[in-house]
Image: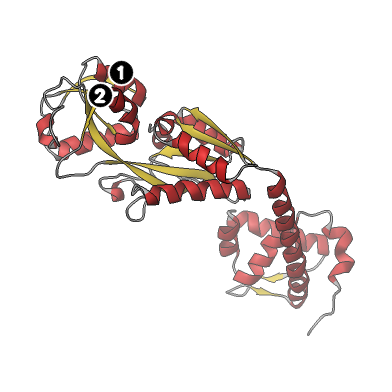
Amino acid sequence: MMYSLDIRKLAGKISSMQFEALKVFCDVARQRSFSQAADVNDLTQSAVSQIVQQLERRLGAQLVDRATRPLQLTPLGQTYYEGCKGLVEQYQELEAAIRQAQDQLAGSVQVAAIYSVGLGDMGQLIERFQSQQPRARVHIEYLHPDRVYEKVQEGTADFGLVSFPSRNRQLTVLPWREEVMVLACPPTHALAGNQAVRPSELENEKFVGFDKGLVIRREVDRFLREHGAAVDLTLEFDNIETIKKAVEVGAGVALLPEPTLRREVAAGTLVAVPLQGTRLVRPLGIIQRRRHKLSTTATRLIDMLRQSAERNGSAPHGPSSGGSPIKKARHSRNGSARASRKAV
């Protein structure tokens, strides 16, 4: 039995509901499943079921036949779906048009980044972007990793730049680049004149490391252990700048990302010696909020950052968006996001 129903007659009721609820119902109708509609909308199955029940109470009609598997719409439910589908599509098109108009007006991008990202060529990248986009304004704030995650999640930063990035229910991760780790030592050190150094040569060397709670510390420890190099840990710090200062005054050597040492190498205060016969990297990623549409300016900046990494050969090798640079399978999806945020 077919019903004829003009969805426009329900405008008074629809105006009191969120269009998100109509979208959820349409997804249930398309998927024929509460659970699959929940996945699409990042909701619980119970929440989706409650949304549909509220719609049914408002309309005074059953929309879904729950006795069948997969779920089927009732005749009235099918009619309601046909009308809602058009409304939802029009609403999404309207939102897209508003966002596009806003993008043309909003040329400002807020970026939150860990301190050590700024030690490389970040300034030059931003200058180049603003020369290509004269009306764009990029504001970059260098922060502790925890604050980078917080600012992105609370929406005060469009995206964040972090090492060993961690995704969660609120955040997604785009791989950005990999920074090769090298041996940092003073120019007077016995290993400073080497073209390259084998990890085993670090045996019993005085070593300046990262704090134990940091992901990068665990990766360096694993790397040294796998290569049979037991170092003499003298100092531990939570940031690269302090580690470099300690190495400069002779407290020991360290394994650090090569881009973070370029200023000291140019000044002659430190030497960066490549590792021989192996590769250790620090992965950097771009974090952003799930289901949040970035402005055109922010999207273009991210594209430029990733393209720059590809051009200089530092783009990630293989599928990775955070995880161990040595054995990626060891950093599981249910790993501690809190620990990952402390990476530097």
Image quarter of residue 284:
top left
Front of the two marks 2 and 1? 2
Residue 335 located left or right of residue 167: left
Question: Under tag 2, what secondary structure?
Answer: loop
Residue 312 in the image: state x and y as whole percent: 36, 47
Residue shown at the point (84%, 70%) measured from the top left: 7
**In this view of the protein, can residue 294 be seen by the observer?**
no
Residue 262 image offset from top left, x and y in percent: 32, 30
Residue 147 in view (yes/no): yes
Q: Nearer the viewer, residue 27 or 35?
A: 27
In which quarter of the view is residue 4 placed? bottom right
Disc 2 residue type?
A: Leu
Q: Is residue 259 left or right of residue 62?
A: left
Check the picture and name the quadrant holding the C terminus.
Answer: top left
Residue in the picture at 21% in, 16% down: 250
- Residue that label 1 marks: 245
Residue under label 2 = 270
